[in-house]
Each structure stands twice: as C-alpha cells, then as structure tokens.
Image (cartoon, grey):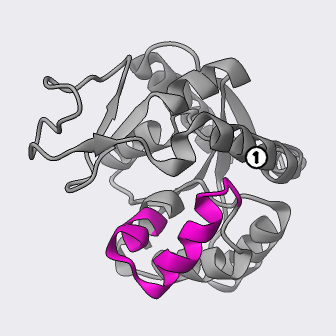
C-alpha cells in the first residue's frame, strides 16, 4: 500500500503518518524530517535547503525528488510507504508517477487533511523544538514541565525560523499556490480523499483508516 498524505503545514500529517506507519508496518517518508536532519548536521544539502526553508519557500524540486526516490528504493519500502509532505507540486507528482511506473509501483490513495488557515497559524506559531535532541513541544497543546527547557534532555527549546508568524504566512501562500492543485490532480485519477483535520487525533486517525479501507475495497 503506497499512500500520500496531503495538507498544509500544521495540518497534522506528521502525527497521522507516524500512527499509520506503526499500524500498517510501512515506513513514513517525511521530506521535512530528512531536510531538517541535514540542516542540524550542516551538510551541504542542509545548508542549501535552510536558505529556502527560512524564507518559507520550497526546496528545489531536483533536491527533493532525488532524495525521495532514493528512499523509496530502499528495502523497507517493498511492501509500501507513506509519503508525508511529498509531492508538493504538480512537477514532483508527475516525476513520482513516472518513477513509480518504472519500478512497477503506483500510488493507491492520496489523503488530504483539511484545516482552516486561522487554526494552522495557531498550531504552527506555538511549536517549539529542542536544540539538542529535536523533541517537539507546543505552547498550548504540549508544554514542557520547565518553561524553555526540554523534558527529555534539559536543553533549550526554541522557535524555528519557519514557525514564526511572518514565515508561516509565506509557507501557507506557497502551499496554496503550489500544492493545492494536487487535489485536482489526484482527484482526477480517483485517488483523492478529503479528511476533516479538526478534532481529536484518534478521530482523525479513524477517519483516515476508514478511507483507506474503502479505497482498498474499491481497488
């Protein structure tokens, strides 16, 4: 089973992707996580990617596509995968489709998690991350025991540049321009299913799993 999770920054793709990965025993492939790991390690790719991420812009297609394709070719993806945050535009979707066809694979379902813009800004602007271990917190939903300190390692937690409000607006604008057309793209192929992203995490997970079950029965 090869799935795509679509949704604006802050919609909850990462959280749902992790649960689905554990449930279906297939890897969650998050371009955001891979890119941020490179940024923390200050690799050549990370330095280049950070220039775009800090502005709320998309990392160039060539960098992202090659990275994802290499990941899909790994042995743990033989039974399927969950793409979290990829593709981000029509060009990436076309390259992905072509590459998968060459590999004898295809996308089974593209699930969109819908959340209104005001809520997205509230979620994103409240996120905090540990500088040392990368643990995530939120000023409303998941506060640390000691303000400004990581519960896991005691290091400083901070607000990433791409989670500041002015950058969030830029990220959402890019999403609306570049990624929203994917709804029509996958919808035209009969692969798109929209899920309400407001509510408890468990309810959203159940709705996604119900959509997957229906999608499987129709395939």
Tell me which segment is drawn in magenta: 35-57
Describe residue 206's horizontal placement relative to residue 134 as left or right: right
Our reading of the magenta stretch's main secondary structure is helix
Q: Nearer the viewer, residue 20 or 85?
A: 85
| Residue 90 among those drawn in magenta | no
Locate residue 172, reporting x and y percent. Answer: 73, 40
- Kindly indicate the quadrant of the structure image that contains residue 158: top left
Residue 193 makes an appearance in the image: yes
Locate residue 210, reporting x and y percent. Answer: 54, 27
Point 57% across, 16% down: residue: 198
- Kindly indicate the quadrant of the structure image that contains residue 138: top left
| Residue 52 among those drawn in magenta | yes
Residue occupied by mark 1: 175
Q: Nearer the viewer, residue 131 or 29?
A: 131
Point 30% across, 23% down: residue: 142
Q: Is residue 38 above or below residue 4?
A: below
């Amino acid at each position: 089973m090869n799935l795509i999770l679509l949704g604006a920054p802050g919609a909850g793709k990462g959280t749902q992707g992790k649960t689905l990965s554990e449930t279906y025993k297939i890897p969650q492939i998050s371009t955001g996580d891979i890119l941020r790991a490179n940024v923390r390690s200050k690799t050549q790719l990370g330095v280049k990617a950070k220039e775009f991420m800090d502005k709320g812009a998309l990392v160039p297609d060539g960098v992202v596509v090659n990275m994802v394709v290499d990941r899909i070719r790994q042995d743990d993806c033989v039974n399927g995968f969950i793409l979290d945050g990829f593709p981000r535009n029509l060009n990436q979707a076309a390259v992905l489709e072509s590459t998968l066809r060459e590999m004898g694979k295809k996308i089974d379902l593209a699930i969109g998690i819908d959340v209104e813009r005001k809520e997205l800004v509230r979620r994103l602007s409240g996120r905090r991350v540990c500088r040392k271990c990368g643990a995530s917190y939120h000023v409303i939903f998941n506060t640390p025991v000691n303000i400004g300190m990581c519960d896991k390692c005691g290091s400083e937690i901070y607000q990433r540049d791409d989670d500041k409000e002015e950058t969030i607006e830029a990220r959402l604008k890019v999403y609306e321009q570049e990624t929203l057309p994917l709804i029509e793209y996958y919808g035209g192929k009969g692969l798109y299913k929209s899920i309400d992203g407001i509510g408890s995490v468990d309810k959203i997970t159940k709705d996604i799993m119900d959509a997957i079950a229906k999608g499987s029965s129709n395939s």
